Image (tube, rainbow, N blue to C red):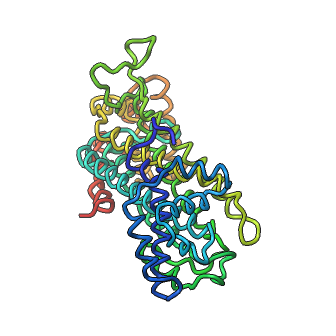
Amino acid sequence: MIPRYTRPQLAAIWDPQTRYRIWFEIEAHAADAMAELGIIPQAAAKKIWEKGKSATFDVARIDAIEREVKHDVIAFLTHLAEIVGPQARFLHQGMTSSDVLDTCFNVQLVRAADVLMADIDALLAVLKRRACEHKFTPTIGRSHGVHAEPTTFGLKLAYAYAEFFRAKERLICARTEVATCAISGAVGTFAQVDPRVEAHVAKAMGLAVEPVSTQIIPRDRHAMYFATLAVVASSVERLATEIRHLQRTEVLEAEEFFAEGQKGSSAMPHKRNPVLSENVTGLARMVRAYATPALENVALWHERDISHSSVERMIGPDATGTLDFALARLAGIVDKLVIYPANMKKNLDRLGGLVHSERVMLALTQKGLAREDAYRLVQRNAMRAWKEETEFASLLKADHEVRKHLSEAELTQLFDMEHHIKHVETIFARVFGS
C-alpha cells in the first residue's frame, strides 16, 4: 500500500497487528468450540483468551521467528505460545494454516467491503445533491464527442448516481460471496477437526461456513470480489473522464475547485488543470489491473498450492485501499465541482440550433414525407448551417420545400428547448424515487 493513496481506516484493516489479532480470534474461537466438545480442557480455552485477548503481538518477534522457520503461521503460533504459556499446546488442534489464513483474509475483505460501501454512500449523497441542484440546467449532450441533442447537467449526475447505486449492490453481493469460513483441516476433510468447530468459528467471526473446501476456500469467490472492485473502478473512471472533458478550455462547462494558493503548473502560472480527476483515472486503472491475477488464482493444483498467496498479499490491501481512496476523492471532486451554466448555454447555441435537427425531421415525417426525404431536406440545411455558421432555423424557413410542409410558426416551435427536458422529472423519479 502506498501511503500517498491510502486512507487510515482502510490501512488499519491490513496492518500486521490487525492480521495477528484476527488470527488469534480464529484460534481462540476454535479452542472454545473444542472445549465445548470435550476435545481440549475448558481451562485451556479460558487461559488462551485471558492471555491473548489484550495482548499486543510483537510483529518484529514474529518476523524473526519466521526468518528461522520459514512459515508465517508457525511463527505466529510460536509467539502466541510465548504469551499464553503451557496451555498453548491446545491451540491449532487439527487445523491447518489455510484455515487461519483464508478465514482471516475473508474477514479483512468483508471489512474492506464495508468501508467501500460507506464510500459509495458518501458519493451517492453528493451526486444526488448536485443532480437536484442542476436538475433543469440545460446542457448539450454529446455522442462521439460531437454535439447531439440537449440534456441537463442534472441528468448527467443522475446517470452517475444510478451507476454507483448499482456499484453498491454489486459490492453487497461480492461481500456475501467472500464472507465464508473454513476450519476443515488438511485437504478439507475434517479428519482431525470436528465440523462443529468450523460452524462455531464462522458464527463468531460473522461468516458463513464454506460448504466444501479443499484445504483452502475456493478462489472463484475472491475472483468475483476483485472483479467487482474493477467494475466499480471503471465507473469511477467514467465519471472522472466526463469531468476532465467538461473542463477542457474549449468546453469549460464544469471545473474542479481550485483553491486559493493552489498552483496548476510549475511553468505556466495561468494553468488550472483537472489533476484530481486525472489522478482518479490512473487509480482506477490500477484497481482493474488487480482483477486479472485474482482470476488466475482460481486454477490451483489439486487441493491447494500457494501460488495465490503472494498475489493476495499484494492485491488485498492494494486494490481495496486504492479504490477507497479513489471513491473518497471522487466524492470530493463532485462536492466542490464548479458549474458554469452560462458556458453550457453558449455551447448549446454554438451550432446555431442544429441540435434540434431530429425534431424537425420527425415533424416533416408527420406531415407525410418519407423519412428518407425528410432526412435529406433537414441534412441539406444542416450542412449549410454548419459550413456557413448561420442560423439553422433561418435556413429552414427560407427553404421552399420545407415550407411546403411546415409553417414559420411551426418551425419556431420546433426549436423550443423545453421540449428536450420535459421528462426530466420522470427520469429523476425513476432514479431517486418520488
Quadrant for residue 243, please give it: top left
Q: Is residue 271 above or below residue 3?
A: above
Q: Position of residue 99 (x, y in %)?
A: 58, 70
In the rendered view of the protein, which quadrant contains the C terminus? bottom left
Q: Is residue 247 left or right of residue 342?
A: right
Q: What residue is rendered at 33% in x and 59% in y?
A: 431
Extreme residue in the right direction = 301
Residue 148 seen in this snapshot: no
Nearer to the camera, 381 or 148: 148
Q: Is residue 155 left or right of residue 299?
A: left
Residue 290 seen in this snapshot: yes
Q: What residue is rendered at 70% in x and 60% in y?
A: 306
Nearer to the camera, 398 or 131: 131
Quadrant for residue 272, please give it: top left
Q: What residue is rendered at 40% in x and 25% in y?
A: 390
Q: Is residue 25 left or right of residue 421?
A: right
Q: Is residue 349 above or below residue 173?
A: above
Q: Position of residue 382 (x, y in %)?
A: 47, 34
Q: Position of residue 165 (x, y in %)?
A: 38, 59
Nearer to the camera, 55 or 326: 55
Q: Number of labelled discs?
A: 0
